[in-house]
Amino acid sequence: MVDPGWYMAVAAALFTIGAVGLLVRRNALVMFMCIELMLNAVNLTLVAAGRALNDINAQVAVFFILVVAAAEVVVGLAIIVSIFRHRETASVDELSELSG
């Protein structure tokens, strides 16, 4: 059996990769994927902690988080694709002028 600490280490690495990608990249789609990577790292942490504590509530919370994340992906990708079709760019630097 794998120690839960290893899952926490993998989750921390995934979260760090997502955070660095979010701060470094300027493409809206890549930033969106980095946010999803960070969300999945948190989900992995919740599942590992729930398994270590022998508690099913963390896994139920992960299920609801994944449902909300799926809805977020649908809306977020629709917005990004709509902006890309009108502007022909997904750079957040050029999209900052939309703030009004």
Image (tube, rainbow, N blue to C red):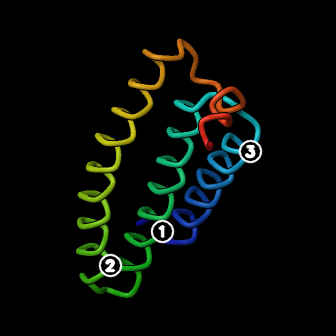
Compare marks 2 and 3 and give the one earlier in the sequence.
3
Choose between 9 and 34: the one closer to the eye: 34
Compared with 29, 74 (above or below) is below
> Which secondary structure, mark 3?
helix
Q: Earlier in the sequence, mark 2 or mark 1?
A: 1
How many neighbours does mark 1 have within 10 angstroms: few (below 14), some (14-19), or many (20 or more)? Answer: many
Q: Is residue 42 left or right of residue 91?
A: left
Question: Label 1 amino acid?
Answer: Thr
Q: Are marks 2 and 1 in contact (CB under 8 Å)?
A: no
In the rendered image, which residue does mark 1 sit on?
45
Q: Amino acid at mark 2?
A: Ala
Measured in 3D between alpha carbons, the distance from the residue under mark 3 to the one under mark 1, in whole angstroms, is 22 Å
Residue bearing the label numbered 2: 58
The residue beneath circle 3 is 23
From the image, which quarter does the C terminus lie in?
top right
Q: Residue at x 29, y 40 (%)?
A: 74
Residue 25 left/right relative to 78: right
> Which circle, 2 or 3, is nearer the viewer?
3
* Residue for point 54% across, 54% down: 38
| Image quarter of residue 40 | bottom left
Whole-percent x and y of residue 3?
A: 50, 70
Q: Residue at x 33, y 54 (%)?
A: 69
Q: Is residue 38 above or below residue 59?
A: above
Q: Is residue 91 left or right of residue 82?
A: right
SS type, badge 2: helix
